[in-house]
Every structure is written in C-alpha cells, then in structure tokens.
Amino acid sequence: MFLVDILQTTSLNNMSEDPNLEKFLKDVDEVSDILQGLNSEDTYSQEQAILKADQKLEHLKKKEDQIELRDKTNRTLINKSGTSTLPSKSEISQESFIAILEKDASERADKRSQNKELANALKDLGNKAFDKGDYETAIQCYSEGLEKLKDMQVLYTNRAQAYIKLEKYEKAISDCEWALKCDDKCVKAYVHMGRAHLSLKNYEEARQCYKMITDIDITKEKLVKGYLRQVDYQEKKDIQEQKAWQDLEAGVEDAVSVTQLLTKLSKAGQSPLYYSGGIQLLVQAVNDSTAQTLFRTKNGFSIIADNCVINRCLLSNQTDTIVFDLCLSVLSLWKVVCNENEENQHVLISHPNANSQIFSMLTSEIPDVQNKTFNLFDVYSTQEEGRSLLLNYFKPSRLFESLIKCGTLKDVRGCTAMDILFSLTQEERLRSYFRTNFKSELLPSLIIFLKTLYLALVNMKACLQAIAVMGHLTEDTFIRRKMAASLEYWDSCLLLVDKCNSPALGDGHKDALTAILGLLFNLSLEENSEIKERGVDISRRCLSLLSNKDGIILTRSVGILSRVLPQCPAAVEMAVQEGIVKKLMKFLKTGGKKTSQYSVKVLAVCTKEDTQARKEVYKYDKNFVTLVNLLRSEDEITIGNAALCLGNCFDLPGAASTWLQPDILKLLLTHAGGDSKRPSVQRNAAIALGKLCSAEPRYMAQLRELHGIEILNSCRKYVCKGPQQC
C-alpha cells in the first residue's frame, strides 16, 4: 500500500514543483525500479527495494510539508506554464498511473532500440573511414553515434584511437575516461589512454594505465610487459636526446667532434679513402650513448648510407684495398652506434640503402668483411627486440639460408653464424613463417646443409650448433611433423649418421653423432608412412650403434628404436634376425633407467610381432627373472611394457610352466588391480595374469585364494581392448 502512496505523492509533488514531463518520468523510473526490486525473488533485492521505498516516502513527506507551509490552499495541482494536460491527483487512479508508467517505459525502450541501431550503423561507417585512413570522417561518424547513444563505450574508444592518429592526445584521453565511465573494465580504454600519455611524454601516467590492464585481465600480462618496455624505451630515448643536446650546447668535446665529423662526411663526391678515414675517426668519437644519440639525431645513418661513393663500395665485391678498408670502417661504425641502442638499431636496419648494404656484406666472399657483418648481426641477435628487427626487415628464408650456409666454414664465422641462427629460432615470427613456407623455403636449405656437412665435417663446433638449430626447430610440432614427413630429409640425416660413425674418423666425431641422434630421436616422435618406409634403414643404423661404449649414444639409439619399430614390422623382423634380443637383455640387466625403459619397450614390440623374439627372451632370461624384477620398478612405463612382454612370452608352449619367482602372481595382481595413471599398465598386467593362469593350472588355486578372479573381472573393461605398449 505504501507504494501506491509513493506513486501518488511523486505525481503530485513533481507536477506542482516542475511541470517538465522528463523530470516527472525520471521519478517514475525510480518508482519502477523499486517495484521491480519488490517483485524480485532475491531476498537481498527485496530488502534494498524496501529501504529505497522508505527513503523515498520520507523525502516526499518532507517536500509536502514544505509545500503546505508555502501554500495553505488545498493541494490542487498548479499549472505554472498553463499548458499541462496531466490529470490531478484526484483524477489519477493507481491503474491509470501504472498504465502511463508502462507506456512510457515501452516508448523509451523503443526509442533506445532505434538509437542503438543508428549508433551501430554510424560506428560501422566510422570504422570503414578509419581503415581508409580518413580519421576526420571517422571521428564525425563516432560523434554522431554518441549523440544517439551517449553510453556506447566502443564509440568512445574508437574515437580515441582516431584522435591519436591525428595527434589530438588530450581529446583521446578524455574519450577514454568517458569509456571507463561506461565500463570500468574496458581494456581498450586503458591501452589508448596509455598510448596518448606516452605520446605526450607523460611516462608515469602511461605506466599506470598499462598496469591497470593486468588488474582487469591477468592473461594480458605479456602484452602489458611489451607496453611497459615501450614506455621505458621511449623515456630512455627522451633522456638521451636531452642530454645529447645539452652536451652539444655546452661544447663537450666528444659531442662537438661527432657533429663536426658528420659535417665533413656529408660532403659529396669525395674519394673512398677520404670517407674511410673520416669514418674511422667517427668510430673513435662514438664512445657512449650521448654520441650514439647525436649520430642519429644529426642524420648520421643517411649521411653514410645515402652517399653514392660509399654505397657503391659497399655493394661491390670489395676486392680493392681502399674499398675493403671502407667496408670494414662502415661495419665498425654501425656496430658501435647500434650497440645496446634499440633506436639506432631500428633506424639502421629500416634504412633501405643500409639494409641492402648489410645483406650484401653478409654474403661477401672476403672473410674479414663477412666476419665484421656477423659481429653487427650479433649485436641484434642478443636481444629480443633486435631479433624481431632482423626478421621484420630481412626475408626470414633468405636470412636463414645465408646463415646456415656459413655453418660449414672452417673459421670463427661458422660458429658466429650458427649462434645468430640459434637465437633467431627462438622467435615465434620465424617459426610461424616456416610453418607456412616449410616445403618451399626451409626444407631445401636444411637438406643442402645436411649434405654439405656430410661432405666435409670441418668445423665441429659449428656443426654441433647447426644440428642444435634443427633440433630447436623440431620443438615446434608443425615443423617437426613436416620434417619427419620428408624422405629426403631422413636420408640426409642417415647419411650424416654414417659419416659420423665411420671407423676412419675414430672418436673425433662422437659429439656430432650424439647430436644427430638427438635430432632423429625428436623426429621419431611422429607416426607416419615415411618413418614406416625408412624404418629398416633407421633401425639398421641404430642397431650398429648398440655396441658403442658411449652411454648417451647407446641410450639415444635404443630410444629411436623404441619409436620406429612399432611403426615398421619389417624393421622388427630385421632387428630380431640381427640379434637385438640378446643385446636388450644385457641392457636390462646392466643399463641405466632410461636405457632400460627404452629397451623393455623395444622388447615388448619384438615379442608381440615375432615368435623368434619370444623364444630368445625365454632363452636369455632364465625363468624370466629379469622381466619379473622389472615389475618391481617404480616407473609405470617400464612396468607396463614388462607385463606386456611377459604376456607375449606366455604364449610359447611350456613357457608359463617354467619355474617363476614365487611372488609373480602377487606382482601381476597388484598392478592389475592398482590405481596406475596409465590404463595400459592394468591392461597388460591383467592379460599376462590371465595367460599365466590359463597356461599353468597350479596358479589358479592361488589366484582364487588371493581373490584374483574379482580383480580380473574388474579389469575386463581394460582387457577387452587388448595389450598395449606404454
């Protein structure tokens, strides 16, 4: 009942104080909210609605008292403007008032829906204009959209972005603030506001904006780190430029020397010797960040790179002594001005002439020139931003091909080139590029390189680094899959295994053999027809290494076999004929944990596929002592494959009748009824247990005593799927 009083009193007071219908309907909206809260099923919402209703009644009562003091006449509504057509309180019933309320709410909803549709259309027009670079038109469209719908957050952030493009940063900040009033968790608003503050050199404000992003969404942490790094970089650049100009105005000797030398070098048409001497002096003068900054701000990069004489020398074969000296001087200069200076690195590599000159000298046939170029690349490759610049401004495949060709060079160039290449393979941009262009641009370079290594293993350190580069690439699942699907790539790798394992080379190439086996181990993670087709060749190489005394070579060889043999039955037959079972049994008795894990898996594969392998296990493992002991391992993979191997061997007539260790039944029952993370462990143990009891009745009584029948029944869901390698 008190709500009726609110409605009637609200009507009376608003229309007596202010005939404006908008103000009246604003009060009606408040009452509507209260009604909605009271009708809510949520207890808290009901309590809040009652509280608001009480407050509203008290407020209106005070207002009525004030009106009565001013006007002792009756409470007839006064139409001050003389135009109101609203009924008086006496004429308004509860039903008619609710009808007015509902009609107004409906009209407002329809109007908002129309405005939203228009605002969205204007937003789309603004976006199209923005994409075309017509930022003024975009701003106009977004502004018209906001006239239709003032609380549409996306219009504010879009307009802020357009203002930034026009360098109207204060307006952009204002729009971002309005966007946050619409949605205080708007990430885009903080991004654009941070960018605007950064452009205004409000570094601390920019940091605060970017840090707010992680408070809203922790998954944006990496993005925020990039923004904060940009702020630090810009602030550092600003400080350096201020100091550089201060030193120059103060007449500091080094600062003055740099500007004077650049003035002299800007003279056109001089001899290469003139430029070479001036650049060498400049190299000595650039000894700190201030000098680096002055070199950049005084247009040093263009003075050098755009000089016709210098450009012609840098793009030539550098055979003349003077030209050769000029090339070395320029490379030395670029290195000192770019060392630990991101802005200079960017300016140099983005300069069209300098970019061409650098690549020309990278492929130079003169060792000193090429080595100096590598030293310059090394400045870039040691930092993430520098690596990104290299990949942005050089075609990745061209850069990769040029560097990997140097892996066979005898001197330090081979090692430096491979170090740079290894650093570049860390970058997602390079991997992404090669995912798209693997067959046409990466694979040919890799195959040529492997064949070159086969012909001449001359620089062992560079060779190891080059194989490490390819190993690093196999960490990318897509690239590894493509490598493993190339027969030519497999053949090239196997040729290199032969080369490194050649008796004529002795132990000198043991490290290279270890590295190439590691690469093959990674490739054999894949399952495809190519591995099946080359399975015999791969397995034969690995079998030849099972007599090697080096533990790593031995482990990797068995590891490759454990992945290749399951894909190639022909390779299993060949391996058994070559006596692999005897060697594996030896490893299981004396080998380390990893070697044993791989060995028992290979043994499980061989005994599953080949009857001769089962007979040989029966022969070389008296009473299955070794395999039963593996059931006591803490490693589930080893246990599962040992159980599988035993189950395979129990298929041999008489094998299960052999005296076994007394606790064999308990061990198998423990694993069959256990809670292993690998279902294959329970499956293999249950199958081995069933075969054992079927072949040897004396175990059946013991099985019943241990309630083994119940355990086997509980394993039925696993057993029906058959044995499985772990």
Image (tube, rainbow, N blue to C red):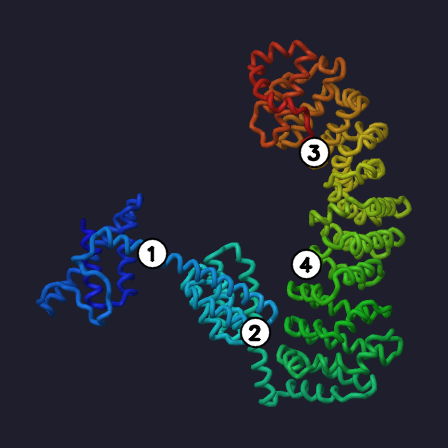
Mark 1 crowd level (few <14, some 14–19, many ≥20, 10 Å Cα): some
Q: Which residue is mark 1?
A: 105
Residue 421 % position (x, y): 74, 59
Identified at 55% across, 78% down, the residue is 239
* Image side of residue 675 versus residue 339, left or right: left
The x, y position of residue 202, in whole percent, is: 49, 74
Label 4 secondary element = helix
Left or right: 630 as drawn, with respect to 148: right
**Tag 3 secondary structure:** helix
Amino acid, disc 4: Arg
* Disc 3 packing (10 Å; few <14; some 14–19; many ≥20): many
Residues tagged 2 and 1 counted as in contact (Cβ below 8 A): no
Mark-to-mark CA distance, 3 and 4 = 37 Å
Q: Tell me the quarter of the image containing the C terminus.
A: top right
- First in sequence, mark 3 or 4: give its number: 4
Q: Which residue appears farthest toward the right when viewing the image? A: 504
Residue under the image location 68 percent in, 74 percent down? 347
Residue at 56% across, 12% down: 705
The residue at which mark 3 appears reads as: 597
Q: Which element is circle 2 on?
A: helix
Cβ atoms at labels 2 and 3 below 8 Å apart = no
How far separated are the C-alphas under marks 4 and 2? 27 Å
Q: Say left or right for 234 vs 475.
A: left
Viewer-proximal residue among 134 and 327: 134
Q: Which residue is mark 4?
A: 429
Report how far apart the C-alphas of labels 2 and 3 lie in the structure.
55 Å
Other residues around mark 2 within 10 Å, as few (<14) / some (14–19) / many (≥20)? few
What label sits on residue 236 in the rendered view? 2
Q: Secondary structure at mark 1?
A: helix
